[in-house]
Image (spheres, grey):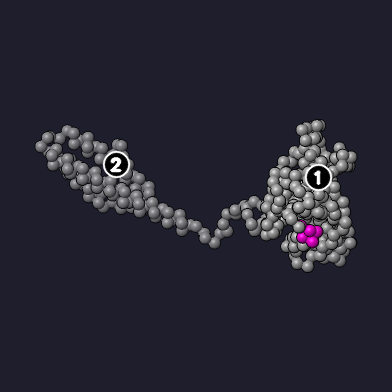
Amino acid sequence: MLQDQITQYTAEINAFDTTSADELEQFRIRFLGTKGIIKDVFDEFKAVSPEEKRTLGKVLNEFKQLAEAKYQALNETTASSKLKTENSQLDMTLPGEGFEVGARHPLALVRREIIEIFNKLGFSVAEGPEIEDDWHNFSALNFPEEHPARDMQDTFFIKKGGEKGDIALRTHTSSVQVRMMEAGQPPFRALMPGRVYRNEAISARAHCFFHQVEGLYVDENVSFADLKQTLFYFVQELYGEGTKVRFRPSYFPFTEPSAEMDISCTICKGDGCQMCKHSGWVEILGCGMVDPNVLENCGIDSKKYSGFAFGMGIERIANLKYVIKDLRLFSENDVRFLKQYKSAII
Ligand code: PHE
């Protein structure tokens, strides 16, 4: 009896073929399921006589293997054909899903550009704290006691009278130059990028913080000619060859002589426009030869060494590059503004 049933089922399995996943699933339930035929025949097998068991056991096992092999073989073909029908519905001409790439902040782009130019001249990058003491922000830099920059008007003071004087938010990154010179001996050739704070009312043209890149070069026999040539090279690299520079005498407590550097207006190329107030020139940085007092304050022999320093506001440089009329845009985090400045370098 059992033998006959198995012969019949074997014929059925051998004849079975499908590409449908549903039909195959029905096949699996019918033969291999927990209440399926295989389970049934094995249950019946328990009741057969011991003589029959010997031959029938082998037949049953082969039957079970046949059903499993059939299921596995068909499962592979239906799975791959399922994939094929899905793939055939793919329209390769449809546009892909957009991939949003973030944008660099314009100030970060300009800062990096400045650093890359000076890197070529061997300048490294130095950083220091934004919360500074009076010594590093003012005294070491030769600011007289009564200098107006120390006034509450310009400086955000945090605490009166620390070990090295009042604690304040740094007003420039010249403080990092002091820290660098105190920590070693020349030659120094470095840039000091960073955020600085000044107590000004926030408007389109002024903010209570901004960003600077200052630079310092100290070695034997450094001259004002080195300063001029270095800054001239910088401007040609940043704004293109043919950009003119001019130096106007100025005053900073920490440099002597001091100058302010103008460049020919990058917007109108010197013809006169709103940006340069029709003068053809725009100021971009302050500079000068490091005052010997500053070198001595930092433990450097001013008879042996000389140096130059300069400092610029990154916002100003970015404005001349991108014509950003309102300073507040830089810190408002308006994505519509920020995502305009996609950079090729990520
Ligand atoms: N520290 C000056 C400022 O913040 C800039 C400067 C740096 C000028 C170095 C001369 C030399 O305005």
Crowding at dot 2, Cα within 10 Å, few <14 / some 14-19 / many 20+, comes out as: some
Classified by dominant secondary structure, the portion drawn in magenta counts as helix
Asked where in the image residue 38 lies, by quadrant, the reply is: top left
Q: Is residue 141 left or right of residue 121?
A: right
Magenta span: 222-227
Q: What element carries label 2?
A: helix
71 versus 281 height, above or below:
above
Which residue matches tag 1?
141
Which residue is located at x 35 percent, y 45 percent? Answer: 25
Residue 255 seen anywhere in this rendered image of the structure: yes
Tell whether position 308 is magenta: no
Q: What element carries label 1?
A: helix
312 versus 136 height, above or below:
below
Tell which of 15 and 263 is nearer to you.
Answer: 263
Percent across and percent down for residue 69 are: 27, 48
What amino acid is at disc 2?
A: Leu
Tell which of 290 and 327 is nearer to you.
Answer: 290
Tell which of 299 and 201 is nearer to you.
Answer: 299
- Cβ of mark 1 under 8 Å from ligand 1: the answer is yes
Q: Residue 233 got which mark?
A: none
Asked where in the image residue 166 lies, by quadrant, the reply is: top right
Which residue matches tag 2?
32
